[in-house]
Image (cartoon, rainbow, N blue to C red):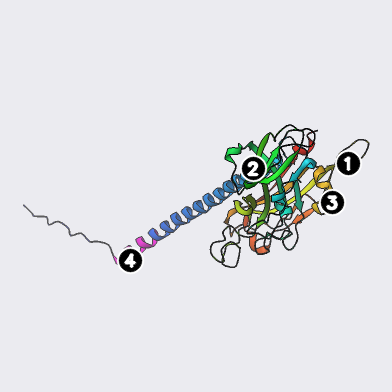
């Protein structure tokens, strides 16, 4: 028998190895490219979803406070007075005067300008040319006398008669009669609220000087509010990404057939604010994702005839405009 020796494995040449590696790298780069594209698409879609959710939340907060504006527990604003101890109260930790923080005017606004229109909003924080909305009201829930906090501000009412604004610490010294009748005491206590909405330049104030936007912080515009807490106006972040806020204000005309006419804040006198019955608000909200493949140079037309074009550095963000109208229902109560 002839013995057949097995053939030795010849193996791969260097050229074959190099070709295999090259083909593998080409396939791998394609997979990586597809993965990167899908990841970017996912992030952009997620940014759009966050934009919509942020807008819904911002609208909800603004609408709630605007609808609460001018609620005084069944008492006309003209029948509200300040307790003697409150009349001399200084608003702590802020440069805003007491007339801004504590007042019987339920709704007020300030026209946007190149610098802050309100002394307690520093220029370093204020997003130029955005309107400022100020809402004041009582409530919404009654506060038992035993639960009153000494450092907070309250409104005490007798429905249909009068009301007094007072600091909790002066509860025991309040008078026990009203204008029209010698019947004792007021009927209810309400927590007094002041809420001031504005657009701040940054989302975080923690990286540089604490409590103010500076060069060390980000540049994400943020819907922010000042809320009366005790005798201080305290900043609260509402939602990041809101970069424009414009409003016009509806007042009933004096014509034979009254109709609502809309004005910018700068065209409304101090005595006319209690007559405002409706607010139209335009808001621009941008996404969280910076997209180098997308450039949006559109100009947005907001209420009040205000035209807004994002600066060149911010045109790689997706953004949407939201318009809504809110009735100041407590000014139309009767």
Q: Earlier in the sequence, mark 1 or mark 4?
A: 4
Q: What is the x, y in percent for residue 226? A: 65, 52
Q: Is residue 163 left or right of residue 29?
A: right
Q: Which numbered marker is on residue 15?
A: 4
Mark 4, Cα crowd under 10 Å, few <14 / some 14-19 / many 20+, is: few
Q: Secondary structure at mark 4?
A: helix
Q: CA distance from mark 4 to mark 2?
A: 97 Å
Q: What is the x, y in percent for residue 246? A: 74, 51
Q: Which residue is mark 1?
A: 253
Q: Earlier in the sequence, mark 3 or mark 2?
A: 2
Disc 1 and disc 4 in contact, CB within 8 angstroms: no
Please name the residue shown 80% across and 42% down the image.
78
**Rendered image quadrant of residue 20:** bottom left
Q: CA distance from mark 3 to mark 1?
A: 14 Å
Q: Secondary structure at mark 3?
A: loop
Q: Earlier in the sequence, mark 1 or mark 2?
A: 2
Please name the residue shown 73% across and 33% down the image.
159
Q: Is residue 209 left or right of residue 329?
A: left
Mark count: 4
Prevalent SS, magenta region: helix
Q: Which residue is mark 3?
A: 269
Q: Is residue 240 visible?
A: no
Q: Secondary structure at mark 2?
A: helix
Disc 4 and disc 3 in contact, CB within 8 angstroms: no
Q: Given this view, does label 3 or label 1 mark the residue nearer the observer?
A: 3
Q: Which residues are magenta?
A: 11-23
Mark 2, Cα crowd under 10 Å, few <14 / some 14-19 / many 20+, is: few
144 in magenta: no
Q: Given this view, does label 4 or label 3 mark the residue nearer the observer?
A: 3
């Amino acid at each position: 028998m002839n013995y057949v020796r097995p053939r030795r494995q010849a193996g791969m040449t260097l050229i074959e190895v190099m070709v295999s590696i090259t083909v593998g790298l080409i396939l791998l780069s394609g997979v990586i490219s597809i993965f990167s594209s899908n990841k970017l698409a996912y992030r952009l879609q997620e940014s759009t979803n966050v934009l919509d959710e942020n807008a819904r939340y911002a609208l909800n907060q603004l609408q709630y406070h605007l609808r609460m504006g001018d609620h005084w527990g069944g008492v006309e604003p003209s029948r509200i007075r300040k307790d003697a101890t409150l009349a001399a109260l200084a608003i702590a930790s802020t440069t805003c005067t007491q007339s801004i923080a504590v007042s019987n005017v339920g709704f007020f606004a300030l026209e946007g300008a190149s610098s802050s229109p309100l002394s307690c909003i520093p220029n370093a924080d204020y997003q130029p040319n955005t309107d400022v909305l100020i809402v004041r009201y009582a409530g919404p829930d009654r506060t038992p006398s035993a639960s009153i906090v000494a450092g907070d501000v309250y409104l005490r009412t007798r429905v249909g008669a009068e009301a007094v604004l007072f600091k909790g610490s002066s509860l025991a010294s309040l008078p026990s009669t009203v204008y029209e009748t010698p019947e004792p005491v007021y009927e209810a206590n309400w927590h007094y609220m002041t809420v001031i909405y504005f657009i701040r330049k940054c989302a975080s104030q923690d990286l540089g000087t604490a409590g103010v936007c500076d060069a060390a912080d980000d540049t994400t515009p943020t819907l922010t509010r000042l809320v009366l807490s005790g005798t201080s106006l305290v900043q609260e972040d509402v939602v990041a990404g809101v970069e424009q806020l414009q409003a016009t204000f509806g007042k009933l005309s004096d014509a034979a057939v009254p109709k609502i006419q809309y004005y910018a804040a700068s065209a409304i006198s101090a005595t006319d604010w209690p007559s405002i019955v409706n607010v139209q608000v335009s808001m621009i909200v941008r996404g969280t994702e910076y997209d180098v493949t997308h450039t949006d140079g559109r100009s947005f037309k907001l209420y009040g005839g205000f035209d807004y074009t994002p600066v060149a550095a911010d045109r790689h963000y997706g953004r949407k405009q939201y318009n809504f109208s809110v009735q100041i229902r407590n000014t139309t109560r009767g």
